[in-house]
Image: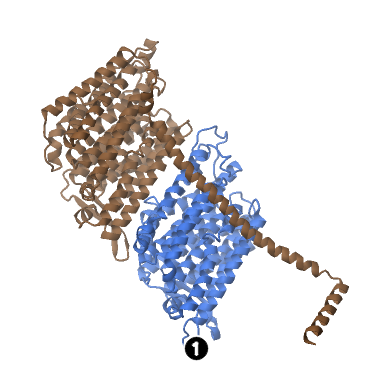
Amino acid sequence: MEAIQALLIFAFAVPVAGLLAALVLGQRRSKGAGIVSTAVSLLVSILILSFFLSSGKSATEGITYIPQLNIGFSLYAYPISVVLLLMSSIVFFAAAVGGNVKGLKYKGSVSLLLLFQVAATGLFLSGNLLMYFIFWDIGVIAAYFMISALGTGGRRRSGMKFLVYSFAASVLLLLGIIMLYYYSPAVSGLHSFSIPYLIANASSIPAGIQTAIFALLFAAFMIKMPIFPLHSWMADAYADASTEGSMLVSGVLSKFGAYGMLLLFLMLPIAKNYSQYVFILAAVSTFYAVFVAMRQTDLKKVLAYTSMAEMGIILAGIASLDQIGIYGAIFGMLAHGITIALAFLVVGSIEMMFGERNLALLRSIGRSAQIPSYMFIIVILGITGMPLTAGFIADLLIFIGAFEAFGLYGLIPLAAIILMGSYLYFFVEKSFFSHGPTSPHEFNIGASQKLSYAILAGSIFIIGSLPFLILNAINLLKVL
Amino acid sequence: MLPVIALFPVIIAAFLALATGSRRITGHIATFSAAVSFALSILLLYNRSPHSEVVWFSIGSYAVHLSFTTAPLNMLLLLIVSGIGTLICWYSIGYIETPSQRGRFFFELLVFMAAMMLFAISANFVTMFIGWELLGVTSYLLIGFWHWKEKVPRAARKSITTIIIGDIAILMAMIILWSSYHTFNFSAILSAPYSSAITVSMSLVLIGVFTKSAQFPFHEWLADAMEGPTPVSAFLHSSTMVKAGVFLVAVLLPLFIKAGLGPVLVAVGMVTVVLGASNALTEHHIKRVLAYSTIEDLGLMFIALGFNALAAAMLLFLVQAFYKAAIFMGAGSIMRANDEDTEIFNSYGSASNRMLFVSNVIAAVSLAGIFPLSGFFGKFAVESAVSIPIYILLLAIDVASSAYIFRWLFIPMRAPEHASLSKARYSHIPLSMLVPEAILAVAVVAGGYAFVSLPGYLSLHPLGINVIGAVLESIMVAVGFVAAYLVYKKNPERIPYTRLHKLAFNSPYINSAYSAIAKSFYAAGYAISGLNTAIDDIFEDAGDAFKYFGSAGRRIENGQLKLYALVFALGIIALFIIFG
C-alpha cells in the first residue's frame, strides 16, 4: 500500500473516530474533540493534496463486500476529490472552531458536525456511485438535524421542507445511479458503480437511456445545488439553521450537488446536446437569485440567494464542457465553499452581538463590531472575484470556458456579479458602515471565533494569491 | 532585479502600521518607507532588463504570468506615484489628528499606494488587474474612512458600485483577448494581428477606463469621493486611481486607434470636460470644485489620446499630478483653519498664512494655464493636438477653468470677522501640512521643463511651439481671471441663482438618473421576489395537497367495523355484478 492510500483510509477514519469520541465525551470536552478531529482532517487533506501533486497520479483503495453485484467501499483520490476534500476540511475546521457561536448544546452540534464530515469525506472521496449515494443521504440526515434540532426561527418547518426536497432528490439519484449501473457495459458479467469506470465507459450507453439518466440525475443535482426553479427549500434552510449548520449546508452540502453535476457532464456524452440549455438555465438561475437577493432583509437570506447565484455561475462553468471552464468550476466550488462559510460565520457573530440579523434594523454596526464588518467586506471581495481572492481565479477560468463554448453570450452571467457587488455594498452602506447612532456596547469576539475568521479569510487569500497550489492538482484532470 | 522590489517598503510599512497603530511613529515610518520606495524607483531607471516575469499559475498547457516592465511610460507613472505618495504620507502625519485612526489610515493609504505602483509597472492584463482592483477596494475603504459621518457611507458606496461596472467590463475584455490570443501580455497583444476581438475587448476596456477615470456618464462618484480625508483626495486626484484609466489607454493606445475608438475617446472626453468645467464654476464645496476640475483635466487627457497625441496627454498627465496634489493639500489646510467647513463661502482668511498662500497661488495659476508654469504647457500641448472644432470648444473651456479656479482662490481670501482668531488658526496649521505642498509648488514651477524633455524620454516626437496658440490661450485665461476678479474679488457676495446656474450645476440631474437606474433594478427585484414567493407557494401547496389526501384517507380508515363491513359487502356485490 502506498502512502497516499493509507492517507485515504486515514482521511475517512479520522472523522469517524472523532464522532465516536464526541459521543462518548461530555458537553465541554466534545468541543475539544471536534476541533482536534477536524484539525487532523485538515492536515490529512493537505497531505493528500501534496502527495497527489508529487506523484501526479490518481489512487484508489477499497474492498468489495458484495462481490456478486460488484458492490464495495472504495476511496478514490483524483483531482476533483482532492480539491473538494481540502475545501470541506477547511470549512469543517473553521466551523468546529468558531461555528457554535452561542456555546450551547456542544455535544449535539459537534457530533452532527462530525457526522456531516464523515458524510462529506465519504462522498467526495467515494470511488463508486453507490457509496456516493449512501453518504449523500447521511449528509442529508446530518443537515436535517442541524436545521431542525439546532436551528432558530421556524426550524422544524424549514427542516421538514429541506428533508422532503432532499429525499425527492435522493430517489431520483438512486434511480439514475441504478440505470447507469445496469446499462453500462459489464466486464465478465459484472456491472460496476465505479466512478472512473463509468467516466470511461458510460459513453456506450444507448442515447435514449442516456437522456433518461441525464434527466433524472440532473433534476436531483439541481435540487441540491440549488438551481432555479427547484430551490425553494434553500432560503428557509439556510436562514433557520444554526450558524455552523448554515456554513456547512451552504459551503459543503451544495457541493454534493455541484460535484454530482460535474460527474454527470463528464460521464454522459449526451450532456453535450443539452449543454446550451443548461447554460441558459444557469444564467437564469443566477440572475433570478440576484434579483431575489436584493429584496431580502434577512441577512442570511441575502447570503443564501447570493450563494445560489454563485452556484449558477459554477453550473455555467460545468455546462461550458470546456477544459478551462471545468477547471474553473472546480476552483469555483473551492472558492465558493470557503467564502460563503465565512459569510455565514459573520452573520453568526452579528446575531450573537446584536440579537438581530434583520438588515432593516441593524444600523452602523461597523464601529462596535469591527472584525465581523471587515470580514464581510472580505466576503464581498471574494464573491465579486477580486484578484488575490480565490473567487477571481474561479470567475476568470469559468468564463474563459463559457466564452469558448458560447461566445459573447457566455459572458452574460458575469454581469450578475456587478449586481451582486452593488446590492452587497448597498447593504454595507445601510447597515455596516453607516451613518447613525452606534450601539453603546463595544463588542469583543472570542478567541475561537477570531481563529475561525483567520482560517477562512486566510484561506481565501492564500488560495487566491497562490492558485497554482490548487491548479497544479486540477491540471492533472484529463477531461473530454 | 524585479521591479516589484520598489513596492516592498510600502507593503512592509502597511503591515507595520497595523502593528504600531495609534503611535505617532506610524506616520513617520510610512513616510520614510514611501521615500525608500521612491528612491528604489529612481534606481530602477538604471535597470538594464526592462521586462521580467514569473509564472503565477498554469491552466492546461498555458501559463499565466505576473509580468513587470520598467519601460519609460511605466517609470513615469511609478515615479509620480512614489514621489507624490511620499509627500501625501508626510502631509497625513499632521492631518490625521486622532491617534486611534492612525493605524487603519496608514494601512489603507499604503496599500492604496502599493496597488497603484503595482499597476504602474504591470506588463500584462492579469498583473494590471490585480493593481486595478486593489485600487478600487482601498479607495472604497479610504473614501469611507470616517464612515460614521453623514454622506460618507453613501459616497464610498457610490464609488465602488460605479467602479465595479468597469471591473467586470475589463474582466470580460481579458477573457475575450485570452480566447483569441492565449496571452495576457500587453506587448504580445499590441503586436498581434488585428481581429474583431480587439474592437470588442477595447470597447469593454473603455467602459472600465471611464468608470475609473470618472468620465461621463460615470463621473459623479469622483465628486462625492470628496467626503474622504483630504490626503486621500489629493492622492486620488493627482496620481492614483483616476489616473489609472488614462494610463491604461496610453499603454494600449495603438489598439484603441486600430479599433477606431479614437472618436469615442474625444466625444466622451469633450462631454466630460464641459460637465466638469460647468459644475466646477457653480459648486460651493471647497473640495468638490477641485474634483470637477479633475474630471475636466482627465477629459482633456482623453481628448488628446483620442487624437493619438500620446506626448501631449502624458505631459498633462505629469503636470496635472503636481498642481492637483498641491491644490488639494491647500484646500485641506484652508479647511483645517476654518473648522473643517467645506462650504467655500464660509472659508476666510486664506492669505494670512504666507507659505500656504504662495503655494496655493502657484498651484491655481498653473491649473488655470498661465505661462510659464507647467500647467500652461500641459494644456497648450493638448490644445495643439486637436482638430479645429474641438480647439474652439477648448478655448471656451479655458475661460471657464480659469474663472473657477480664481473664484476658488478669491473667495476664501476674504477677511474674516474675527481676523486675529483666524490668523491664529492659520498659524497653527502644522508644518507637515505646509511643507509637502510647498515642495509640490516648486515641482509645479519646474515641471514646465517636461515640455522639452518628456517626449524625448518617451521616444516620441517633440512637441511643437505655436506662438499664436500660446497667445490665444493666454488671452482666454486672462478673460477668465478678469471675470473671476470682477465677480468674486470685487463683489464677494453670492451671485443669485439663475436658469443658467441650474444648467451649469447639473450634477443633481445626473445623480437622479443614477438612482432611477438603481430603482429600476430594485423594482425588477420586487417583481422577481414576488415570483419567488409564488413558486415557493406552489411547492408548499403541493405538499399541503398530499396532506389533504392523507387526511381524507384517514377519515375512511376510522376503525368502525360496521362501515368496513358495509364497504366489504358492497364490494362483493359489485364484483358479482361485474363478473357474474
Tell me the quarter of the picture where residue A462 sits.
Answer: bottom left
Query: Would residue B190 be found to the left or right of residue B64 on screen?
Result: left
User: Of residues B344 and A433, which is closer to you in this image?
Assistant: B344
Q: Residue visible at 13% across and 43% down?
A: B459
Percent x, y for residue B352? 31, 15
Percent x, y for residue B523? 51, 45
Tell me the quarter of the picture where residue B290 sits.
Answer: top left
Seen in the picture, residue B176 relative to A441 is either above or below; the reply is below
Q: What chain does badge 1 belong to? A: A
Q: Residues within 10 Å of mark 1 (few under 14, many from 20)?
A: few
Judging by the rendered image, the residue that carries numbered circle 1 is A189
User: Of residues B212 and B554, which is closer to you in this image?
Assistant: B554
Q: Colour of chain A?
A: blue
Label 1 secondary element: loop
Q: Is residue B144 visible?
A: no
Q: Is residue B488 visible?
A: yes
Q: Colour of chain B?
A: brown
Amino acid tagged 1: Gly
User: Of residues A13 and B575, which is closer to you in this image?
Assistant: B575
Percent x, y for residue B507? 39, 31
